[in-house]
Amino acid sequence: NPPVLILDDALSSVDSHTEKAILENLKDYFRERNTIIISHRISAIKESDWIYVMDNGEIVEQGKHDDLLRKEGLYYLLYQRQKLEEALGGE
């Protein structure tokens, strides 16, 4: 049981429904350790305590999910694009 868990795009090869099920099953496991989740999918990180948004190797935004959405910056644009892709049936 490591004190730190790093998931580097670990859920990228599963569909959004499977991702949700996996994350739900791991919630208690995450609570017991520091977890770093690296993901292109906002759905995988939106419940994180703190989110860093990177662009071209630099941190361009940071904060909680709702705060980042209110800023209407890069995170917001990525979120809107992913919502649209989901609505159109894409992953």
Image: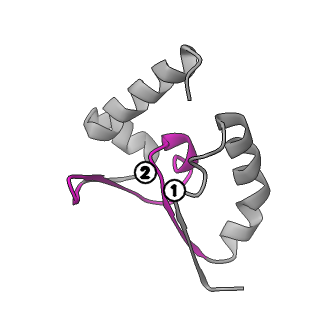
Q: Position of residue 40 (x, y in %)?
A: 44, 46
Where 88 sits versus 17, above or below? above
| Count of marks, rendered view | 2
Where 26 sits versus 65, above or below? below
Q: Position of residue 25 (x, y in %)?
A: 79, 55
**Image quarter of the C terminus:** top right
Q: Amino acid at mark 1?
A: Asp
* Mark 1 burial class by Cα count in 10 Å: few <14, some 14-19, many 20+: few
SS of the residue under disc 1: loop
Looking at the rendering, which quadrant does residue 73 occupy? top left
Q: Position of residue 36 (x, y in %)?
A: 50, 68
Which residue is at 62% across, 85% downward? 3
Please report the bounds of the magenta region as a residue range.
34-59
Which residue is at 67% across, 68% downward? 30
Where 72 sits versus 27, above or below? above
Image-based side of 89 in relation to 8, left or right: right
Give the mark toward the camera: 2 or 1.
1
Looking at the rendering, which quadrant does residue 21 occupy? top right
**Image quarter of the N terminus:** bottom right
Q: How is the image coloured?
A: one colour
As drawn, the label of residue 52 is none
Residue nearer the viewer, 6 or 50: 6
Q: Check disc 2 and report the residue beneath it.
A: 64
Q: Earlier in the sequence, mark 2 or mark 1?
A: 1
Query: Per the image, is 51 magenta?
Result: yes
* Mark 2 burial class by Cα count in 10 Å: few <14, some 14-19, many 20+: some
Where 88 sits versus 54, above or below? above
Which residue is at 27% across, 38% downward? 74
Q: Check disc 1 and report the residue beneath it.
A: 9
Separation of residues labelled 2 and 1 (CA atoms): 19 Å
SS of the residue under disc 2: loop
Which residue is at 72% across, 60% downward? 27
